[in-house]
Amino acid sequence: MTTVAEAQKSIISQAKSFGEETLPLEKALGRVLAQPILADRDYPPFNRSTMDGYAVQAADFLDKKLSQLQLVERIHAGSVGTQEIHSGTCSKIMTGAPVPLGADAVVRVEDTQETSGLVTFNIETIRVGQNIAKQGEDAQSGQEILSNRSVITPQVSGVLAVTGNAQVTVARLPKIGIISTGNEVVSLGTPVQTHQIRDSNAWVVRGFFHSYQVDEISTTLAKDDKAVLQETVAGFLADKDIIILSGGVSKGDADYVPEILQLLGVQQIFHRVRIRPGGPIWFGTTPDGKAVFGLPGNPVSVQVACKVFIEPYLRTCLGLPLLSPLWLPFSGNRTKKTPFDEFFPCELIIHNGQTGVQAVRYNSSGDIAATAKSDGIVLQPAETEQLADNAVVAFYKW
Ligand SMILES: Nc1nc2c(c(=O)[nH]1)N[C@H]1C(S)=C(S)[C@@H](COP(=O)(O)OP(=O)(O)OC[C@H]3O[C@@H](n4cnc5c(N)ncnc54)[C@H](O)[C@@H]3O)O[C@H]1N2
Ligand code: MOO
């Protein structure tokens, strides 16, 4: 049976780009840049005062030991001084204004007194460059200021705006089709009988893709009926990039998903992985490179599969690096139940002043409430029979 690492490797090797598109900046938050961004000019673009104060020549204090200077003008942010600073003179300057020619330091207004055009300085010392952000010290014109494949966070969005990028080229997102299979599964809003269960898997998968800004998501239910399943999957194969099914991949009499997918020309890459929960997972691709994930129906299996298999696939398609786990101390003890890699829901805690993780109460992969109280999942690797208190574990945040 395939190991988790082998399964991840073969999933990643099938990843492909969905192309690029150009969007207005206001629509690009959370998207992935598909171009490097170069500084369009120096940053700061001019020698900028970082304090409200007086622009002076430091040598007037250091060499000439002056303590009083003649005021020649006032410079506000958004305007440019007209007077060059010479020995014995200064200009009042506001934060954000360009430092006038001749000046090489700014003294804070708090350290001065101004009377009738004369400024008295109450300072012990001064440094050349004091309170001045030098032209180009943050970034130089033409320098790469954002790399290709940066995620457009609020911080990145600020850089895009300041560098004049009203439009940005980003990675195009896939169209997703989600099929929840099972005669017992009913949609939210439909009356539910005792032996039935409301579809929660589609909401989890939808939410996972939403976290990557994917919004072209179609969901549907399919009964455990070969013809219905075949028609539903065929419909999605026609125009979706990624198809996610849940349920119907194990050993039950009505587990038709693997058979129907292969009938429709989806080439199986693996079926069953040495993982708990989520062992019966099926993965394959179409000849034109669409990915099809057949996830086990249990709710926690679906959540774990999103994190362990679908996220690495999507990130690689978008050109993003794989996420690394956080390595944190584990509070508690855990004995492994299977010979496989086991993932279990955990919450972040502060223990002895340090961040750590501890397991949340969790019955099994059908426990719909447990993961909602967790911050992510911890891996107990196949070879680790016993997780001891304080062992450092790999924690994958949801
Ligand atoms: N004889 C064996 N039986 C089972 C095995 C096995 O190896 N041998 N594996 C078990 C494991 S592990 C899992 S996981 C499940 C997976 O089975 P299926 O993928 O066929 O899933 P279903 O049987 O259709 O559903 C399992 C469970 O999940 C509930 N479910 C299904 N869809 C939804 C949905 N959309 N929203 C919420 N809950 C859903 C369903 O009602 C079942 O309770 O097989 C084990 N059996
Ligand atoms: O994948 Mo099953 O959910 O291990 O229980």
Image: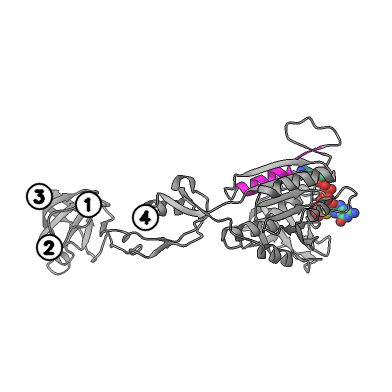
Please state which of the two labelled residues, at mark 3 or mark 2, is closer to the viewer.
3
Q: Kindly state the secondary structure of the residue where label 4 is placed.
A: loop
**Which kind of residue does numbered mark 2 sit on?**
Leu
Q: Tell which residue pokes out farthest to the right in this image.
A: 253
Figure quadrant of the N terminus: bottom right
Q: Mark 2 to mark 4: distance in Å?
A: 42 Å
Q: To which residue does mark 3 refer?
A: 117
Please state which of the two labelled residues, at mark 4 or mark 1, is closer to the viewer.
4
Q: Tell me which residue sits at (78%, 69%) in the image.
A: 383
Horizontal arrangement in the rendering, residue 380 relative to residue 313 (left or right): right
Q: To which residue does mark 4 refer?
A: 163
Magenta-highlighted residues: 197-210
Asked whether 167 falls inside the magenta stretch, the response is no
Return the x and y of residue 124 as percentages of the image width and height: 21, 63
Horizontal arrangement in the rendering, residue 82 relative to residue 296 (left or right): left
Horizontal arrangement in the rendering, residue 87 relative to residue 191 (left or right): left
Say if disc 4 is inside 8 Å of ligand 1. no
Q: Kindly state the secondary structure of the residue where label 2 is placed.
A: loop
Q: Mark 1 to mark 2: distance in Å?
A: 17 Å
Say whether marks 2 and 4 touch (CB < 8 Å): no
Q: To which residue does mark 2 refer?
A: 66
Location of residue 193 by image quarter: top right
**Which kind of residue does numbered mark 3 sit on?**
Gly
Location of residue 229 by image quarter: top right
Say whether marks 4 and 1 touch (CB < 8 Å): no
Return the x and y of residue 147 as percentages of the image width and height: 46, 62
Q: Tell me which residue sits at (74%, 48%) in the image.
A: 234
Q: To which residue does mark 1 refer?
A: 109
First along the sequence among labels 3 and 1:
1
* 171 in relation to 388, above or below: above
First along the sequence among labels 3 and 4:
3
